[in-house]
Image (cartoon, helix red, strand yellow):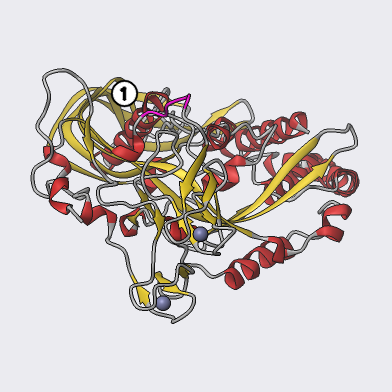
Amino acid sequence: MPMDAVEPDTPPPATTDDAPRVINTDDGAKDGLAKCARCGATEISLNVATGNLRCGFCRFEWSTDNAIEAFNLNGDIATLTGLLVGSGSSDIVPSTEEILTFKCSACGAEVVIDTNTSTQARCHWCRNTLSMNQQVPNGAVPDMILPFKVEKSTAVEKIAHFVGKRKFFAHPTFRAEFNAENVMGVYLPYMVVDINAHAKLSGQGEHQTRSYTVKVGDSTQQRYDADLYDVAREFDIHVNDLTVESSSDRLDQNTAVNSNNIINTIMPFDVENSVRYDSNYLAGFTSERRDSNLDQLEPLAHTQAEDITRHRVNDTLKFYDRGVRWAAEEVEVRGQRWVSAYLPVWLYSYQQRKSNGKTFLHYVAVNARTGETMGSIPLHQSKLLLVSGVVQLVGTVIGLVLVAVGV
Amino acid sequence: MLNLTLWATESGQIIAAGSSDDDSGGLGLVFLLSGFVFYSAIYFRYRNTDKRHGHESETEATLVNMQEHDEFVKARKGLSNRRMSGANNTAVRGASNKAATGIMSKFKLM
Ligand SMILES: [Zn+2]
Ligand SMILES: [Zn+2]
């Protein structure tokens, strides 16, 4: 494997124009039969317990290179300049066919892989598994992949526990149909970004000096004295592994029409443990293709980097206990590195059919690295409104009494 | 459904106003709004529409070469708000879940 081509110590030289420099992440990647080194079988899958790939016949296990080390992605963010992208993060070519035909190197048959749904297929003549690891410009093969670590049984337990605590007001149809065993392992597409920026913030801050009560009419009110200061901060900021969704469906987080915020909530992932992409990690799981390019994701990533900057600088503003009002915020991105990744999620999805004929997709999602679980459960609206009404009735009576006696 | 969520948010604000600015009658107000408070508590517990990844605090970042400038301007007396007006040092603008940031920023007024 010509690993030197990655140039471990020096990033590719800066070009004069703004063209991104590309880290080749599929050097040495081979399509077709990937065989077990011990017995030659192609029945290879992830052993979730160890994080290794395992041969289905002789149980031989091996691991793939850590992606961060292989592509030198942990290089000092301080020295990052310009735009550096993994070859699997480059722009999607719209005309790229999603159907690719391979020649099986065992028996010579022509086998079709639909990269829309998978990057693996089985030869229907000799039963060998054919894998696609080389990047095609349609976003189906990312730079790196973070293998599943949380076992299915654990995910089932977590989902059952989450839903179990939310049964009383759950929609009766959902309660009847719920079965945590229907969970699926999915690799979802993300972009992982490192950012080197220089920040300048200026404005005013207030520090409380006194707090006291004053009489206004026949009641008392709280008053405050404060010192006003001009405040400015200037520094460099190194953002590490900022992670953004790169599927346009998942990026849309309008909670009135979808529950994508649930999947977003289970972040972050330990992306530093990602390995070089190998489609054998996909066996037994499904995956979703990336369909957003860097230009579409860059504005969001930069706004999030500004949020991170604003929040991190608060460590130096503890004196201003009444807050700081920034009048000017300038976060100048000097260097950035983008890598595309498949990250693992256990997903229980439930399609709710509403009375108006519309459907709404609810999810319970488990981060398959950290076990963080979040979900959306369809509500039994009439039951909730009824109980809320009873609570309101009792509350009104107590409230009126309390207001009357002036508590 | 969305309307009720908004109601719930509004009720949160009213409670906030009731409890922070004026101590008398606050508890009574909570009871007068108990139906809305109950509805929104259950709604958020089941649907979790207010949840999102806290990229601003959960992403690793290092600050280096910090230069600080702080200069006293003047003393202000008799302010009625506990927070500086227009303070924006905890603002979040890059959340894909806009609903969550909207709701959360309103609740933060408490
Ligand atoms: Zn083997
Ligand atoms: Zn074959």
Which residue is the extreme one toward the bottom? Answer: A58
Q: Main secondary structure of the magenta part?
A: loop
Is residue B105 in view from this perspective? Answer: no
Query: Front-most of B77 and A283?
Result: A283
Query: Front-most of A327 and B53?
Result: B53
Is residue A141 in view from this perspective? Answer: yes
Which residue is the extreme one toward the front? Answer: A108
Residue A9 at x, y percent in the picture: 9, 48
Residue A255 at x, y percent in the picture: 65, 35
| Magenta segment boundaries in residue numbering | A91-95
Q: Amino acid at mark 1?
A: Trp
- Residue position for label 1: A326
**Residue at disc 1, secondary structure:** strand
Label 1 lies in what chain?
A
Q: Quarter holding the N terminus of chain B?
A: top right
Residue B66 at x, y percent in the picture: 13, 37
Name the residue at 87% across, 60% down: A176
Vertical placement of residue B99 versus A278, above or below: above
Vertical placement of residue A185 versus B3, above or below: below
